[in-house]
Amino acid sequence: MIGILKPRKEIIGQVFSGVIEEIGEKTNNFRVGDKVYGLSGFSLGAYAEYKKIREINSKQGCVALMPDNISFEEATSVAYGGLLAQQFLEKKTINAGDRVLIYGSSSISGVFATQYLKNLGAEITCVCRENKFEFMRTLGAHKLLDYTDKKSINKLEQYDLVFDCVGKARNSELKMACKNHLHDKTNFISIDDEALLLDSSRLLRINELVQKNIIKPVNDRIYSFEQMIEAHKYVETGHKRGNVAVTVNKTEVLGFSPVKDQE
Ligand SMILES: NC(=O)c1ccc[n+]([C@@H]2O[C@H](COP(=O)([O-])OP(=O)(O)OC[C@H]3O[C@@H](n4cnc5c(N)ncnc54)[C@H](OP(=O)(O)O)[C@@H]3O)[C@@H](O)[C@H]2O)c1
């Protein structure tokens, strides 16, 4: 997908937020000056000052007006974690009092899921390393388990839903054991069960949650464009908390037309 001998797309990056500079003649939903956020899908190119994107969802991306109560950097956290988590959670009926275990709760979709499920009244057990317990409590965790502690397995209860937010590459004995602690075995869902759907209507539903302060964006670190290598190195440690954002400042180039020059 990204190229065998060299990168197929020279500018990578899949999550963006920013201000609309120009619109096409047939654009219906956006105006110049609108603050937007979204994902660029297979077209990548989000690590750039300008990005051309269709207003209609496609494999090349999706875009929506962003919530007006958060920053651009915070918006990227919501776009990525929110789309991922909600794709799975919107399909499930969660009732107040249901017991839910969120595995990898400090991941980008884990921090979203914890806040979303807390709002629905679920009893939430979060799984992360101990140094993140206090942070997860502030987001709504009722109980906490450390996946590196062997004794955690004995503390597992029976759950209505187990949501694996870190996917198949990140495992532990505790994660395997969770599968035997469900009332209904089909209620183990993993963030890797389906490919991410690029859906601007879902982004708009997420906007409402953010505007009502039900979901607060979580940015672990924010880097400048010049610190891109450090940003990637930090993410690759596999222990970020929520999101890492990179700020790309616009350079004023005389006579540059973002729409025409990127075709
Ligand atoms: N379905 C799709 O199309 C799609 C698209 C994009 C991403 N994804 C999935 O989403 C994941 C990305 O998550 P992310 O961006 O948040 O990054 P990440 O680097 O995968 O996750 C970081 C978090 O994972 C936790 N973690 C690391 N190892 C763990 C383990 N063995 N058990 C439990 N938790 C562990 C860390 O918490 P601690 O510091 O406490 O360990 C950290 O907070 C990817 O790995 C991928 O599987 C799916």
Image (cartoon, grey):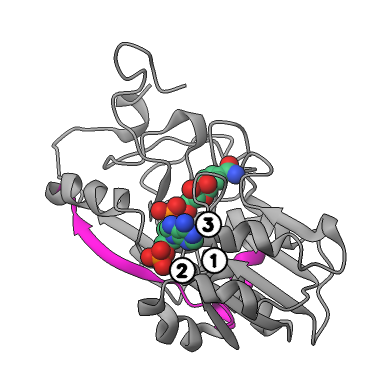
Can residue 226 be seen here? The reply is yes
Towards the viewer: 239 or 1:
239
Q: Secondary structure at mark 2?
A: loop
User: Residue visible at 50% across and 44% down?
Assistant: 169
Q: Quadrant of residue 162?
A: bottom right
Question: Of label 1 and label 3, which has the lower sequence position?
Answer: 1
Q: Which residue is mark 3?
A: 172
- Mark 1 CB lies closer than 8 A to ligand 1: yes
- Type of amino acid under label 2: Ser
User: Residue visible at 57% across and 58% down?
Assistant: 173
Whether residue 208 is in magenta: the answer is yes
Write down the region rendered in magenta: 205-225
Residue 65, horizontal then vertical, whole percent:
53, 59
Towards the viewer: 92 or 8:
92
Q: Residues within 10 Å of mark 2 (few under 14, many from 20)?
A: many
Real-space Cα separation, disc 1 to disc 3, in angstroms: 17 Å
Q: Which residue is mark 2?
A: 106
Whether residue 103 is in magenta: the answer is no
Q: Are marks 2 and 1 in contact (CB under 8 Å)?
A: yes
Q: Secondary structure at mark 3?
A: loop
Real-space Cα separation, disc 2 to disc 1, in angstroms: 5 Å
Q: Are marks 1 and 3 in contact (CB under 8 Å)?
A: no
Q: Quadrant of residue 100?
A: bottom right
Frontmost of labels 1 and 3 is: 3
User: Residue visible at 36% across and 34% down?
Assistant: 45
- Type of amino acid under label 1: Gly
Q: Is residue 62 left or right of residue 187?
A: left
- Mark 3 CB lies closer than 8 A to ligand 1: yes
Q: Which residue is mark 1?
A: 110
Residue 202 higher or lower than 159, as above or below? above
Q: Residue 33 shows which numbered tag?
A: none
